[in-house]
Structures are given as C-alpha cells and as structure tokens.
Image (cartoon, helix red, strand yellow):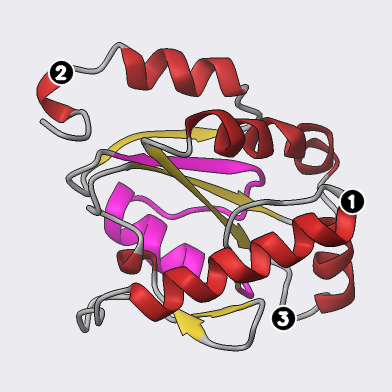
Amino acid sequence: MRHRHCLWAIFTALLWTASAAAAGDDSAQFEMLDGTTATLEQFRGRGKWLVVKIWASNCHVCNETAHEMVSLSNHRGHDMQIVGIAVDANGNRPGVLAFIERHALNYPVLFDDGQGTAYIYRRDVQQDWGGWTPTYLIYSPQGDLVARNIGAVAESDVVQFVDSYPPESRPGS
C-alpha cells in the first residue's frame, strides 16, 4: 500500500511539472522527486487554494503532523493543492525519501536546502524565514498569500480558515 502512495506522489509530481506554465524570473528553483525542476509559481494562482508545508525530515513536529496534510489532500483535493518543501533535502536526501514513504505523502514535494524557502518567505512575507519547521503558507486561488503559520496546523484549522474566506476568493468565483 505504501508503494502505491509513493508512486501516486511521483505521478502527481510528474503531471504538475509537465503541465505547469513557465515561471517568471522572480522565482526559486527546486528539484522534485523525479529530478526535474519546479517553482512554487507553477502551483500558485491555478484556481485552487495552495497550502505549502515547509518541513524537515528530522523535525519531530513535522513527523507528528504529517498525516494532517495527507488527509487534507485526500479530502479537499478538488479545491486545494498541497505542496511540501523539504528544506533538508540537499543534505539528507535519504532521510527525506524515507519521510515521504513513511508518511505516504500524496502531494508534490520540492527539495531544498533552505535557500529557496528563505527567498520565497522573504519575497512573499516580507520577513526573514528563520529556518522554523513546520511553517505553512496559504495562497488564495488567485495566488495571493493570505496566511502563514509557524508551528503545527491541523487539517480542520486549514479547512475552517478556507471555508470562512469571502466567497469571491473561492475557486470558480
């Protein structure tokens, strides 16, 4: 069963990479599981909410809460896209791959050394990131950053936040 989830994650990553539009010059490049490169902009503003979870494989809280985003992806894939950014991927690729398999991540994961994440956080939040994991960024279906959180976030909290957002900001509006 786990292998099927990993294959699904690889398939999803390949689909997103193949169908994504070319990114502008103002983006950080990340490696994906299949070795291709991607940018966060390939996922933003595509008519779905984007929930970005920044994590590290050795982060206790990241491991304890990994199931939350897997469940969110399962239940709200019709109007939300989850993307993970593994900030310890360049120095701990085996640990990151084990994390992905252990938690049966069912969404694309971008591999980083923290530099791309720091750039995105500085650009979108207007503050230095600080290296905290987990960190969450939530973008509206139009691609605007609407929330950020450092620390654990439950699936129900994301759903409550998104469902309470003004109707004109929802997909299909």
Count neighbours of disc 3 (C-alpha within 10 A) and say few if under 14, some if 14 to 19, many if 20 or more: some
- Quarter of the figure with residue 89: bottom right
Q: Secondary structure at mark 3?
A: loop
Evaluate whether residue 57 shows in this view: no
Please provide the residue range marked out in magenta.
112-139
Could you tell me which residue is drawn at 10 percent across and 24 percent down? 168
Residue 45 x, y percent position in the rendering: 22, 53
Q: Amino acid at mark 3?
A: Asn
Identify residue for label 2.
167
Identify residue for label 1.
1
Label 2 close to label 1 by CB (< 8 Å)? no
Q: Give residue 87's mark.
A: none
Residue 143 x, y percent position in the rendering: 22, 49
Q: Give residue 90's mark.
A: 3
- Quarter of the figure with residue 2: bottom right
Residue 95 x, y percent position in the rendering: 88, 67
The mark nearer the N terminus, 1 or 3, is: 1
Q: Amino acid at mark 2?
A: Pro
